[in-house]
Image (cartoon, rainbow, N blue to C red):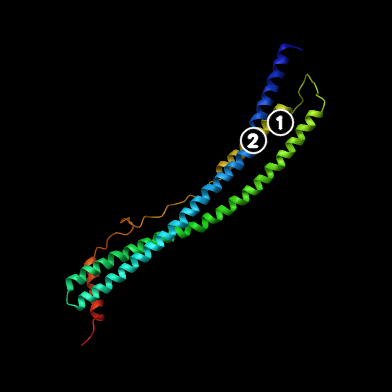
Amino acid sequence: MSVITRLIQLTRAATGELLDKLEDPTMMMNHYVREAQAEIENVQQELQKQEAMARVLQQQADESAKLAEISENKALEALTAGNESQARDLLNSKLYYTQKSQAYTHSLEQVNFQIPLLAKRLEEAKAELVVMQKKRDDLAARVQQAAAKAQSAMPSFSHSFPEGGSASRGFQRMEEKILQWEAHLDVKRQPYSPYTDASTTAAYPAHPEKDSIIDQQMELLRKKLPTE
């Protein structure tokens, strides 16, 4: 056997061993299972966060609406007592709380839109994990069976490599693994857009005709005044 032939055989053997380590199916499946478990945990935490946020926003919207109602009632009392200036101030407070309630409600709608999407993704991720774990277990059993057969088989020595030999098949397997990785990376979770903070004035700019609104509210209050 020539030195060159021996070097080629050693190189191919080393390459095959390296490929086997790189594409260890059990190791890869364990890695995917851990990724799936991490995704489930992340989605579950995000879902709990959004559900808690929805409860807080609902409470804030209700409180602001209640304060707006209280301000209007006090404005009517002030106007009944003849204190028009105080009534206008209270109507201004009513307008402020009304806008806050609307802002909280708008944010609540955005959060409520995300919650079912997250819940659906969580169920899908859990189902994917079950399938993945089953495939991992089946594959691990097949690997053990193959290893047992390999140990019991007699080694075969050859000085030549047929077409489509182990090295070629090894590279083909690596190509398949790379395609799997690329497909895995292409799967992106639907981006989530956080809700707009209710205190953000940009989403709800001040009304340019605020005084006109107060005047209209004053007229409505006057209509509620008791007649003699």
The image shows residue 14, relative to residue 204, as above or below, that is above
Check disc 2 and report the residue beneath it: 27
| Viewport quadrant of the N terminus | top right
Which of the 4 image quarters holds residue 171?
top right
Depicted 5 relative to depicted 163: above or below: above
Q: Nearer the viewer, residue 154 or 52?
A: 52
What element does badge 1 sit on? helix
Report the front residue among 162 and 88: 88
Question: Going by the picture, which residue comes out furthest to the bottom?
Answer: 228
**Alpha-carbon distance for marks 1 and 2?**
20 Å
List the residue tagged with mark 1.
169
Looking at the image, is mark 1 or mark 2 earlier in the sequence? 2
Where's residue 124, x and y in %?
A: 59, 52
- Left/right placement of residue 49 relative to residue 27 reads left
Q: Nearer the viewer, residue 199 or 167?
A: 199
| Quarter of the image that includes the C terminus | bottom left
For residue 98, side relative to residue 168 (left or right)? left
Q: Residue at x 61, y 36 (%)?
A: 178
| Horizontal side of residue 3 vs 70, given as left or right | right
